Image (cartoon, rainbow, N blue to C red):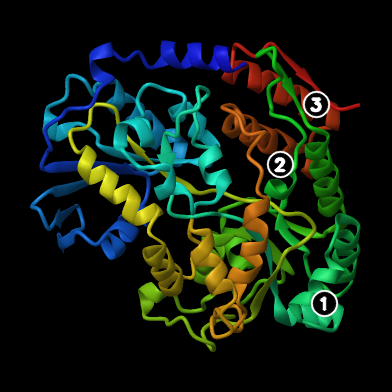
Amino acid sequence: MKKLVALLLCLMMVVPATLASAETAEGKVLNIWCWNDEFQSRFNAYYPEVKEIAEDKSTTTLNDGTIVKWTINPNEGNNYQNKLDEALRAQESAAADDKIDIFLIEADYALKYVDSPYTLDVKADIGLTDEDLAGQYKYTQEIATSADGKLKAVTWQATPGLFAYRRSIAKDVLGTDDPDAVQEALADWDKFNAVAEQAAAKGYYMLSGYDDAYRTFSNNVSAPWVADDGETVVVDANLMKWVDQTKLYTDKGYNHKSSLWDATWAADQGPTGKVFGFFYSTWGINFTLLGNSLATPESEGGKQEVGNGIFGDYAVCQGPQPYYWGGTWICAATGTDNIPTIKDVMYSLTCDADIMTKITEDTQDYTNSKSAMDSIAADPNFGSAFLGGQNHIALFAEVAPTIDMSNAGPYDQGCNETLQSCFKDYFDGTVDLETAKKNFEDQIKVKYPELSSVEWPA
């Protein structure tokens, strides 16, 4: 399969050999491409060489005079990847100050770029050493390692997942909001389903929608989406467990029939919500969930404090299975003339334990330094006000080392999104199970013509 994927990538993105080696002169413009402002905010706040930030945030000036230009293209409709691919194909003919120097990628499509000639080797080309990288979580490097063994990207964050639950609802349903007691009640899927029944009897939903638990199932599959023959899509039995559970939850009223990111899903996380909890990784708890919990958003003058919505009413436990969700990796683009600066950026923002500690202390995000996170996990004075004072880093620190990327593959994004989409009609009862399967097969073959068949578990 790896040979097939490599061939397809070469056909899709042909790069002349002259582009394979980076320029030797240090440029004074650093072009960074992203899909939102998350990395931009981390860079501007924590990269030590930042001198000045433009009022409109379109550029950042470094101490040596380098101008960082930010190009942000939102993800919707594959917009970011489409524009990035077009720019990378034009990289060789672009003027030096217009070439992409750094671009960001997500876990779901990481291998598309990791196994392409558009990304430089973090060690051989950029110059980071094994010693520099030794403190990072292993899985964050595994997902960014090419088929021929080259590390092609690094990240400042690790993204283990937990189950974030409403303390007040847990008290009503279980009689306690203590994280250890709630974890005992949710320790496996049978227990989780039993609590869903109890919650429904009290007028609550266990989950908001169809997709909430998906990552927990999809991260625990037994094999990659595509078999070694490079032609057969194999639907893992664990994914059909998600189908069965979601159908049950929909039929029984255990979920609110929402979809990730829609208005119902967001509202369910706020003051009017009646949902027991949400599967969320590091970034989701501290940014999305927190923001949705506020009655008065920060943009309207609201504060992150108890009394504003349900701030302080959430807590976290590990839930029925370990999983991860998301993450953002930094790639150095082939053709860049800013290798020394890129090396310093990568080192500072992904290898420096002091900077990683500072990011976590300031933002509650979980960063990619095992020593830094273990230290914070053991700190009795560290806690999240949003989570009622709980030290969530301690729970994340238990999950992060267990993350296994061995079943990740280049078809993950397309197959996962298509499976979720095709089964929504089944959950709602507008098609039967066999029709939902057929719709998945048809759509996958259109999306990936090289994949000729689909195998379902017995």
Q: Could you tell me if residue 37 is visible in this image?
A: no
Q: Dividing the image into 4 quarters, which one contains the N terminus? A: top right
Q: Amino acid at mark 2?
A: Ser
Is residue 451 something one can see in this rendering? yes
Answer few, some or many: residues within 10 Å of disc 3's Cα (few below 14, many 20 plus, some between 14 and 19). Answer: some
Whether residue 158 is situated above or below residue 452 in the rendered picture: below
SS for dot 3? helix
Direction from residue 424 to residue 269 in the image, left or right: left
Q: Which residue corresponds to mark 3? A: 435
For label 1, the residue is 181
Q: Is residue 293 above or below residue 415?
A: below
Q: Using the image as rendered, state which of residue 276 and residue 100 is in the foreground.
A: 100
Residue at the limit of the structure toward the left, as seen here: 65
Residue occupied by mark 2: 218
The amino acid type found where label 1 is placed reads Ala
Q: Nearer the viewer, mark 1 or mark 3?
A: 1
Structural distance between the alpha carbons of marks 1 and 2: 26 Å
Circle 1 residues within 10 Å: few <14, some 14–19, many ≥20: some
Between 159 and 90, the one nearer to me in the picture: 159
The percent coordinates of residue 333 (x first, y second) are: 30, 32
Give the spatial CA distance, label 1 vs label 3.
41 Å
Select label 3 or label 2 by which is in front: 2
Q: 225 left or right of 25?
A: right
